[in-house]
Image (spheres, helix red, strand yellow):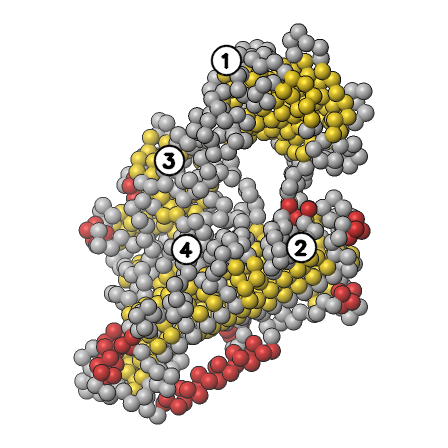
Amino acid sequence: MRSALIRLLCLYLALGCLRQTFAAQETVLYVAAGGNDAWSGTLPEANAAGADGPLASVDQALTMLRRLRKEGKLPGAATVRIRGIHRLDRPLVLTPEDSGTAEAPVTITAYAGEKPVLSGGRVISGWRKHNGRLWTADVPEAKTGSWCFRQLFVNGRRACRARTPNKGYLHVESLVDDKPGAPWNEGVDRFRFKPGDIRAWNDLNNVEVVVFHSWNTSRVRIQSVDESNRTVVFTGPTVFRPLSWDPDQRYYVENCREALDSPGEWFLDRASGRLYYWPQAEDDMAKAEVVAPVLGELLRFEGDADAGRPVVYVHVADLSFQHSDWELPAAGYGDPQAAVTVPAAVTADGARHCAIQRCEIAHAGTYGLWFRHGCKDNQIIENQIHDLGAGGIRLGEPTMAATDEAESSRNLVSNNYIHDGGQVYAGAVGFWLAQSSRNTISHNEIHSFDYSGMSIGWNWSDAPTRTLHNRIEHNHVHHVVRGVLSDAGGIYTLGTQTGTVVRGNIFHDIFPYMGKPAMAWGIYFDQGSNGLLVEKNLVYNTLNGGIMNTGNPGNTVRNNIFAHSAWHAAWRYQFQKEPATVVERNLFYLAQGELFYRDGGQSDFQSRWNHNLYWRTDGEPLMFYSNRFAEWQAKGADRDGVVADPRFVDADRYDFRLQPDSPALQLGFEPIDLSHCGLIGRAEWVNLPKQAVFAPTVLPPAPAPPAPVTVDDGFEDLPPGSPPGRAVVLVEGRGDAISVSEVTAAGGKKSLKLQDAPGLQHRFNPHLYYQPHFRTGTAVLSFDVRLEAGAMLAHEWRDDGQPYRVGPSLEIAADGKLRAAGAAVGDVPIGTWVHFEITSRLGQDAPGTYSLSVAAPRRPVLKMDDLRCGSEDFQQIEWLGFVSLADAETAIYLDNIKLELRANNAGK
């Protein structure tokens, strides 16, 4: 910590010394509102005669500097000083011709003590009362199509484009495409809505639908609406398939004139060229400043790293960049993650030794700032970046640069305040870095985003990358995800990141949308994450835990505090491969929930867990999956760890300093000094985030175990062709199907048909399963089955472990041979209904056996007891499935599926 502060202080001192050195030979041009581009620009104010003074535009100042440089008339540093509000009609573009040198940089800054605004917006005036509570103003350019803005700001506040519902969401009723069982990443261009949610509104083709997936959103344009069939069709597909995860698939409708029904909303009628606004109580429309953006980009460093023509030594300081818009393609928008294709209001390519310092970027429709391609040795320091359509700062690119020169590297992103984003693209992140190495990301404060706070890395495997040797230190990331999206983290990592250090950060208040799936962690190692050192971080107030996926290889997680998680303290996930991750000298502190999520980590004894401390305060037993600590240690895990009170000063008030007698110190835990996390420097700067107000955090209750679900399916109440109502069905839609049939039945008139087909991608399709959630008692299953010629059936009970434990199981081959518990036990007739009964005791004292009864016409009943379960420690049923295994056109029929749960002493 101390060395980082010293480095940053030295940087500020060095910049100050450079300014003094350059002052003697400095060329200064002034730009002010009310200036004149015909003047010299060498005077800060107009002279008495009104014949000379400041310039009117920054563009003209840059043009003059280029001419002076070409003529050899720039003896030293050059500075452009700006005053007032400047409405840009095109982005400011800095090219290699605008470059300075190390000895004589070019600086674009403010008049001393001022904060000029470079705005990409235009003021809209001429407001008049319309009817009711609406006000209106004319925008003739909208009627011609030359200015159709998507954002509006009233007195510096973002207004809401008319939407329905005003708060919360609508919910998709069903899909109407012809691809049942299609994968989750295959989008759709239509769905069925619930009664009254969507109508054939006026100006329908400008109405947009925002669809929420787990970790991102789609924004699609409406092409048509069929109100009678309640079907909406879009001009292009969503990025992911709705209803893939959550049965309450969310969306809302935006930019609809009929939805303009509450204060703060606006609508631009393009056909009439008229803007409508419903003022909030504090808005005086006779005085209000209403601004709409004209530009999508405000500033660009336009170097060419590939051609060896960078922009070098240009410093931008003390300016406010405001009002940029966003665009929507004709086919709509959808990114796989992190709003990765969305541009930025300030963009740099080929920038070297440049700086953006003490600036503001606000009221943007996209990301705030992106140093993208071939940017090296730049400094992004002490900027406030807020009110963003997408995220805050991006560094690097999604694709790996072909050469070292084309890679962005060695940049400093420090002491920035990044907040309140995701206003348009909820899947955007506060800070994003990919395919970029040897950067320092330090002392930033990030809050109020709808997805992850930081995202580091951009490939989902352990393939080579350029995301290496980065330092993520002393940042304060909090109140992200915000109950809007899911599958997120305070910091989220991907891929190989050799040499990257995540140290001394605070991550807290990270809670997802509480639908399916509800997932958010403090530190999230996603796919391929390896090579990271994560140490001396504090993580608290999360839903799913302080850390996710310690089964990934080659990471070190040490000397961290993981506290106050709602559901789990950690997800270990499944062990991947060597070298095993080291998890040591960490403190896990619970007040509720479970220590570990019951995933593949249950069988991970390769990852090197040791010298960790565990404690819970609610009086419940501290369980390591299904084991007590001693049992877990006996299996080889954390043999030198302890279960003990860590003796925090006041954990309930988030004071996680250790008292002198803390047992953590005996484990070698080093106290963490987090007093300088987040912003540093001037008191007014450091205190700025304190203006943000957050409700006190109350952890969501730990989820109760799902109640047992019995089954009694005879299919008589379902129409032919429909799926079973109580089971989960998986088909590929390539000739396979599962549906109710009237062809044959064991009792009544209907049964369930599993239609198989040749050439399917997975042999285990089609299949269906029930989710009984039986944990104790005796499970009794009975069903009737009929196999047609060539059919093959597998039936199995499983728990929810990763890997799962198998209980009773049986298979019927195409020739009728029956196997149970892995051994041949007889045969059953083909083309005839056969009755099965399976009984197995569950719970901690379960013997790991089951009994089987098979009854076929004109044959003696086959009865077997004490058959061994597939896993000797099988205790509960979370998955009870029927699988068609043939690679042929054939069918299986099921009927009278009945699953009961009895007390262990019943039915004897």
Tell me how far mark 2 sits from mark 4, CA to CA: 33 Å
Q: Earlier in the sequence, mark 4 or mark 1?
A: 4
Image point 44% across, 70% down: which residue? 409
Tell me how far mark 2 sits from mark 3, CA to CA: 46 Å
Image location (x, y in percent) of residue 236: 33, 41
Q: Which residue is mark 1?
A: 742
Q: Which residue is mark 2?
A: 607
Mark 3: few/some/many CA within 10 Å (<14, 14-19, 20+): many
Q: Are marks 2 and 3 in contact (CB under 8 Å)?
A: no
Q: Earlier in the sequence, mark 3 or mark 4?
A: 3
Q: Earlier in the sequence, mark 2 or mark 4?
A: 4
Q: Which residue is mark 4?
A: 340
Q: Dot 3 lies on which element?
A: strand
Mark 2: few/some/many CA within 10 Å (<14, 14-19, 20+): many
Q: Earlier in the sequence, mark 3 or mark 1?
A: 3
Image point 33% across, 81% down: which residue? 100
Q: Which residue is mark 3?
A: 190
